Amino acid sequence: MKHKFLIIEDDPFIAINIKNVLEMNAVEVVGMAKTIEEARDLLKETKPDVCLIDIQLQGDFDGVLFAKELDKIQLPYFYLTAQTDPLTLAEVEHTRPLGYLVKPFTNSGLWSSISVVWNKYLSEKGNTLIVKSDGYIYKIPETDILYLEAFDNYCYIHLTEKKLLVPHTLKKIREQLKGNHFFTPHRSYYINTNKITNVGKKAVFINTNEITLSEARRAELLQIVRNS
């Protein structure tokens, strides 16, 4: 099955070039948008698997606004950008792209940059945690987990919309996870580093959740965040 890509780029030459590169590599391009309004409409109509978003659409940071909307529905995306200046970096600081595709790019370089990260994402997404809670069996994609929290001999699994209490220790659940995007900020927690929104001196934040961060683990976590 072909993966569906949506391109949001206001330069028609660049958009068509990207479309051609993707289609040469067995990817289905479901649409091309020049504005955030067109992108929203195509998102509803085509239901893409991933988006490629120009950070600046017609001179504004509309691409970042659209990216924040995708973060809310957990739809993956790459940024397209010709800018790496402090202003641009400040605008994208609190978004969670899979990566950055820096213009100008060669056709081979473009696909290489996309495929490596995209295949890694698909591999991690395919990992599923199966647990029992309140008499129900849940199959949870590892990418949906925000963090684990120890609770005596039990463990809470925190998701975006709810949390599940499972009859296993944190250590037991942690050992079942296969992805390499988890980290122990404190002995009572195990967090998904892809969900981090901020790192403080004594706490790490995932959305509005404040999680204890030990001083001994902070430097390592900061390095992981910088490299992600």
Image: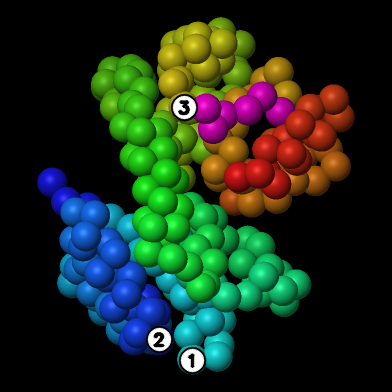
Mark 3: few/some/many CA within 10 Å (<14, 14-19, 20+):
some
Residue at x 63% of width, y 75% of height: 83
Q: Looking at this view, name the residue that lies furthest to the left.
A: 1
226 left or right of 10 in image: right
Asked if the residues shown at circle 2 and circle 1 are in contact, with their CB atoms under 8 angstroms apart, the answer is yes
Mark 2 to mark 1 CA distance (whole Å): 7 Å
Label 2 sits on what residue type? Asp
Residue 71 in sight: no
The prevailing secondary structure element of the residues shown in magenta is strand
Residue bearing the label numbered 2: 10
Q: Which residue is mark 1?
A: 58
- Whichever of labels 2 and 3 marks the residue nearer the N terminus, that label is 2
For image coordinates 22% across by 66% down, the residue present is 29
Q: Residue drawn at (66%, 44%), measured in percent from left and top?
A: 227
The quarter holding residue 32 reads: bottom left
Residue 191, above or below 137: below
- Give the mark, 1 or 3, whose residue is nearer the N terminus: 1
| Magenta stretch bounds | 180-185
In front: label 2 or label 3: 2
Q: Position of residue 131 (x, y in %)?
A: 35, 18
Kind of residue at disc 1: Gln
Q: Nearer the viewer, residue 7 or 63?
A: 7
Task: Give the numbered dot on residue 179.
Answer: 3
